[in-house]
Amino acid sequence: MGNASTWIWSSRHHRKKLNYSRNDATQLPSHALRQSIWLPRKLNWLIGLIFSIGSLLFLTACICSLTLMSGLATALDLSNTNRMFFSGSIFFTIAAYLQLYQSANPDSLFQTSITRPRNYLGWRPNDIGWISSALQFLGTLLFNVNTYNAMSSDLTWLQQDLRIWLPDLVGSILFLASGYLAFAETCHSHWSWHIGDLSWRIVFSNFIGCLAFMAAAATAFSTPDSNHLRLQFFSMGMTAIGAASFLIGALLMLPESTSNSNFKQPKIVDN
């Protein structure tokens, strides 16, 4: 009886048109880093690049905020730091929408030989990848709201909770749900450990970022009696960890995208 070599079908690889299986993933990074420097025609590469910019803006704003909270001198004041958070959220939303668009067109994207109408939002409630992308997009919209409102300096503590903290909390919950679904989609189970799989590293890093954002949002509320400086410092630190995790995941999407053309359907080959 011969041995069987099996391609493991992946929902993530299918919708992103990645033409390698988990079996091949450990061999990809050796050449992909050189090829991923400039791939503007690859949608997955653009998504990773835009997420990287947004994450870098968030991380820089966090570092500046932590520096301000520590009483150290910095070239940026609080208003400029808040503007940086808002700018980062815009990049998050653009990338999240492109990912939702990608998930809404898993069969026709990059298939020039097949003419099908584009679906700009989609409705695929049975598709775990689409649900993950939709929740993430909604979360980024709420981050737009809370970071925009954070630029106002004349809000009472209650207005801060309603306009800044509440959208942040709900958005972080949506991000956490999205991150877990993306992780489960790649793992093919509730949990698995595939450190050699490039796609697994991406979704794992993003899931860590979602957990950190959730911890940050849960401790970012305002009260009328005190500023809770230690809690604010913890919340900003968690935001920084989340931004760094998202940055790592986004940068890893660049080499992942080197094989998102000429997609091959999974198959079983008997030896």
Image (tube, rainbow, N blue to C red):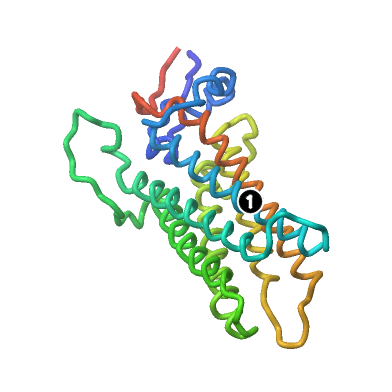
Which residue is found at the position 64% from the left and 60% from the top?
81
Decide if residue 101 is on the left or right side of residue 245.
Answer: left
Q: Crowding near pointer 1: few (<14 within 10 Å), some, many (20+)?
A: many
Which residue is found at the position 31% from the left and 55% from the top?
121
Decide if residue 220 is on the left or right side of residue 180.
Answer: right
Please name the residue that numbered disc 1 is placed on.
243
Decide if residue 106 is on the left or right side of residue 163.
Answer: left
> Which amino acid is tagged 1?
Ala
From this view, report whether residue 222 is shown above or below residue 271: below
Instruction: Give percent across and percent down for residue 42.
Output: 39, 32
Which residue is found at the position 41% from the left and 18% from the top?
269
Instruction: Give percent across and percent down for residue 10.
Output: 44, 37
Decide if residue 249 is on the left or right side of residue 19.
Answer: right
Q: Quadrant of residue 12?
A: top left
Instruction: Give percent across and percent down for residue 111.
Output: 26, 31
Q: Secondary structure at mark 1?
A: helix
Pick whichever, 125 or 48, lies toward us: 48
Which residue is found at the position 28% from the left and 38% from the top?
107
Instruction: Give percent across and percent down for residue 235.
Output: 72, 64
Q: How many marks?
A: 1
From this view, report whether residue 15 is shown above or below residue 181: above
Quadrant occupied by the C terminus: top left
Pick whichever, 153 or 227, lies toward us: 153
